[in-house]
Amino acid sequence: MKIAALARPAAALAVAAGLIWIILLALGASPPNICQALWDGAFGNWLVFTDTLIKSTPLLFCGLAVAVAFEGALWNIGADGQLLAGALSAGALGPRLGGCPHPFATTALLVAGAGGGAVWGGITGWLRARRDVNEVIVSIMLNFVAGQILSWVVHGPLIEPSRAFPMSAPIARAAELRLYFRPSRINLGMLLAVVLAFASYGFIYHTKKGFELRAMGRNRRAALFFGINTGALTIWIMALSGALAGVGGATHVVAITHRLYESLSPGWGYEAIAVALIARLNPLAMVPAAVLFGALDNGAQAMQRTQGVSPVLVQVVEGLVIIILLALDTTAWGRLREALWPSQWNATEQDPPSSYKAI
């Protein structure tokens, strides 16, 4: 990603922070103290930093899922449901792998998670390709379906043996991802997310299928004219997108929770849309973007404890960032920036346009 491409996300963050700063002053709060509490809650010591990484990991998996689909102008709003589908697959299989070797058991659960997410994403892709059903509506509705299925299984078929609590039986110890540097919860799932970010970058920008995906995202009719099977590609890409989110759900079960329960996801799939937009759909830039949003989420709790400020403020910041980013892509802003910095922006206009401009 070129340095110039970072200017817009950085500007959106700065403007959002400035607006929140003004609001806090108007409410009589102390913005410096709130920022300090936010920082201490996200990076204040080794344990809170590792918790920030834990919150960042599902955001990175879901952000990659969103970015892959968005590159093809497929608006996958269903990463949350796909993550839950992956977690369900892993949580259902996990208790049955007690006698398996550790590498096989963990790999099996991650593959099961990818499969569950792929099926959930593939449903959306199939309906879009074969029935021309809007993928935004389908993917959002499937989020609620996945959430209700999860609620049903932890109250019924997968409930733990005592049947006293609405949660599943724990996965086998052989299937758990090992933790490092205890009492922190550092695990290899974090490394897997980063590896998949590099793999997604290579796929999008350095493979034939990735080129076809970007071509379809820029102009579906032109891609079809030049021989790209957009219907099959739509199904395949939505399945791949779902698999990435599904691996995120499986990783969270295998490494952190070790069982299923209601409200497993606090909305990672929706927040990941903001992560993808901040990163301009670049998988490599999504790593620091996910850490940023993970830090905001983790620091929000400390901000509430020490300063009495609602953690909802963090969600306001995230919403403002998206609104400002979209505003910076308007025609009016384009004319203004060309008037203010003509030479700089004329040079960068040669870069391919961002896929999410069609949102």
Image (cartoon, grey):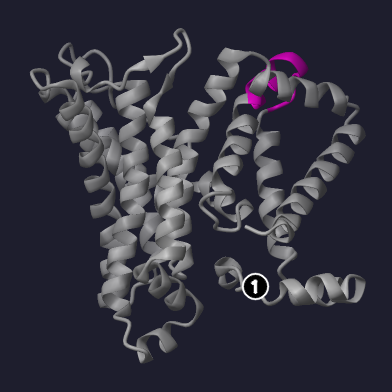
The quarter holding residue 114 reads: top left
- Please give the name of the residue rendered at 55% of the width and 58% of the height, measured from the top-left corner: 281
| Image spot of residue 261 (x, y percent) | 32, 26
- Please give the name of the residue rendered at 50% of the width and 47% of the height, measured from the top-left corner: 270
332 and 28: which is toward the camera: 332
Picture layout, residue 297 above or below residue 115:
above
Q: If the image is split into quadrants, where does the N terminus sit? A: bottom right
Q: Main secondary structure of the magenta part?
A: helix
Residue 77 seen in the figure: no
- Please give the name of the residue rendered at 84% of the width and 45% of the height, measured from the top-left corner: 19
**Stretch of the chain drawn in magenta:** 299-310
User: Outermost residue toward the bottom?
Assistant: 225
161 and 51: which is toward the camera: 51
Relative side of 185 to 293, left or right? left
| Image spot of residue 6 (x, y percent) | 71, 55
Picture layout, residue 304 above or below residue 235:
above
Q: Amino acid at mark 1?
A: Asp
Q: Which residue is mark 1?
A: 351
User: Outermost residue toward the front?
Assistant: 206
Picture layout, residue 173 above or below residue 5:
above
